[in-house]
Image (cartoon, rainbow, N blue to C red):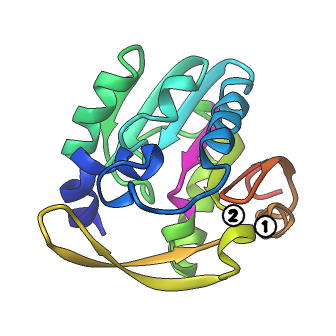
Amino acid sequence: MKEYYDARAPEYDDWYRGRGGFADRHRPGWDEELAELTRTVAALPAGRTLDVACGTGLLTQHLRGDVVALDQSTRMLEEARRAAPRATFVQGDGLALPFPNDAFDRLFTGHFYGHLELRERERFLAEAHRVARELVIVDASKKHSGIDEQMQQRVLDDGSTWEVYKRYFTGAGLAAELGGGEVLFEGAYFVVVRAEPGS
């Protein structure tokens, strides 16, 4: 997984922007929903926020306040520094966060939680509970896919093929999995849930 995202970094935003290998995908309402997702992220109250698995910074740039962005991929961090120059960047493991207890008001993550298998999810939620008072997760909606989980074959522009574990969520289902929470947004493609880790 780590090697895959490092290799994918320069083309990752093609998925959001409908470019490259995603140019021919039929995604009705995608642009409007992406704009609503951006507004939802930008509306989160300003605070000290840790963005785990920040990727290219496409969502990081909309977080308000003092933002620390973490990713395991050097190449993703290079992309993110351009998108969100006001953030502080740290290379590290999202399942073993290099921060002290209660260091953040919020832990934010976009399209990371849905790639975690059960034991990884347990580790991530324990770390989220340790370092932050609030957790906000952005991930893939089940409404459009109708799928709970699957192994996906992904092909990059260089022709390399990678197998990636992926889950999809309803807002209520994700909130319940987190032990309760508030659905901030739910559309055909994205869900956003805010919760108190470990609650």
Q: Is residue 106 magenta?
A: yes
Residue 58 on image: x %, y % = 45, 35
- In the rendered image, which quarter contains the C terminus? bottom right
Amino acid type, label 2: Ser
Residue at 65% in and 75% down = 145
Q: Earlier in the sequence, mark 2 or mark 1?
A: 2
Instruction: Assign a secondary structure to mark 1.
Output: loop
- Judged left or right of residue 181, residue 155 is left
Q: Which residue is labeled 1 in the image?
A: 170
Query: Crowding near pointer 2: few (<14 within 10 Å), some, many (20+)?
Result: many
Residue 16 on image: x %, y % = 47, 47
Residue 98 on image: x %, y % = 39, 43
Q: Which residues are magenta?
A: 105-113
For the residues labelled 2 and 1, say whether their Cβ atoms are less than 8 Å apart. Answer: yes
Please tell me the numbered disc located at residue 64.
none
Q: Quadrant of residue 162?
A: bottom left
Q: Quadrant of residue 172?
A: bottom right
Q: Is 78 situated above or below 63?
A: below
Query: Crowding near pointer 1: few (<14 within 10 Å), some, many (20+)?
Result: many
Residue at 45% in and 28% down = 68
Q: Which residue is labeled 2 in the image?
A: 141
Magenta segment, prevailing SS (helix, strand or loop): strand
Amino acid type, label 1: Thr
Q: Is 75 situated above or below 84?
A: below
Q: Is residue 197 visible?
A: yes
Q: Is 126 situated above or below 145?
A: above
Residue at 65% in and 50% down = 137
